[in-house]
Image (cartoon, helix red, strand yellow):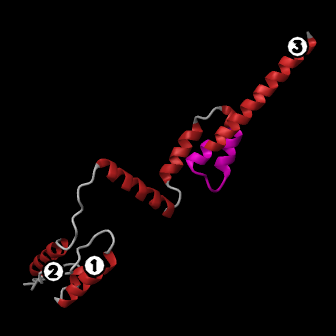
Amino acid sequence: MISIMLKITEHKLNETNYLDWSKMVRIYLQSVDKDDHLNNEPPTDDTRQVWLREDAQLFLHIRNSIHKEEDKSLITYFMEFKKAYKEFNVLLSFSPREQMTIMSFLVDLPSKFEIAKSHILSRSKISFLQDIFTRMLCIENTHSAQTNNSALLRKQKTILVL
């Protein structure tokens, strides 16, 4: 049987105190000679049932030392998720999902973008979708300006010939 203290730590775990909290939990488990429950698998001999029962008691006791998160509105949850997602993306390399999105975008582009598309795909590092879109938009604006200039020149030549 585990002799369980009333409190493992004075402060419940929250989003800011994990290191201190986890240190106190480890010290508590050492003080009741149960730190083997942190990393060890349950024994396979006759002591297994006792070990599992003690493990469940420790789990419940530790769980009670964790601050329960209050219900958040959907908007708050989404904004926090979006912030975490942005931070997470900074830490990760270019994701397969982002690559798939870019490939889907590039595959159906009109033929006037073929040279730019080939250039993007031949690079060892592909940009983000927004960068690629901005680049294609610049190409389209340049192409549109060249087409307008050509049409204007043809119109001027036609007027001169008349």
Instruction: Determine whether the residue tagged by mark 2 lies in a helix, strand or loop.
Output: loop
Of residue 87 and residue 17, the one placed in the foreground of this image is: 17
Write the start and end of the magenta stretch as one range. Answer: 114-133
Residue 152 quadrant: top right
Q: Which residue is mark 1?
A: 21
Real-space Cα separation, disc 3 to disc 1, in angstroms: 84 Å
Residue found 12% across the figure and 79% down from its top: 54
Amino acid type at image mark 2 = Lys
| Badge 3 or badge 1: first in the primary sequence | 1
Position of the N terminus by quadrant: bottom left
Q: Position of residue 91 (x, y in %)?
A: 49, 64
Mark yes or no: residue 60 visible.
yes
- Residue 124: within the magenta? yes
Instruction: Indicate the secondary structure of the residue bearing disc 3.
Output: helix
Say which mark, if any, is on residue 64: none
Which quarter of the figure is the C terminus placed in?
Answer: top right
**Residue type marked 1:** Trp
Q: Marks 1 and 3: in contact by CB < 8 Å?
A: no
In reply to whether residue 155 is colored magenta, the answer given is: no
Question: Which residue, given by chain and number where applicable, does mark 2 sit on?
Answer: 7
Amino acid type, residue under disc 3 in the picture: Ile
Contact flag, marks 2 and 3 (Cβ < 8 Å): no
Q: Are marks 1 and 2 in contact (CB under 8 Å)?
A: no
Label ID, residue 159: 3
Q: Residue at x 9, y 81 (%)?
A: 50
Q: Is residue 40 visible?
A: no
- Snapshot quadrant of residue 156: top right
The CA span between labels 1 and 2 is 12 Å
Q: Is residue 125 left or right of residue 45?
A: right
Whole-angstrom CA distance, mark 2 to mark 3, is 93 Å
Q: Is residue 26 above or below residue 106?
A: below
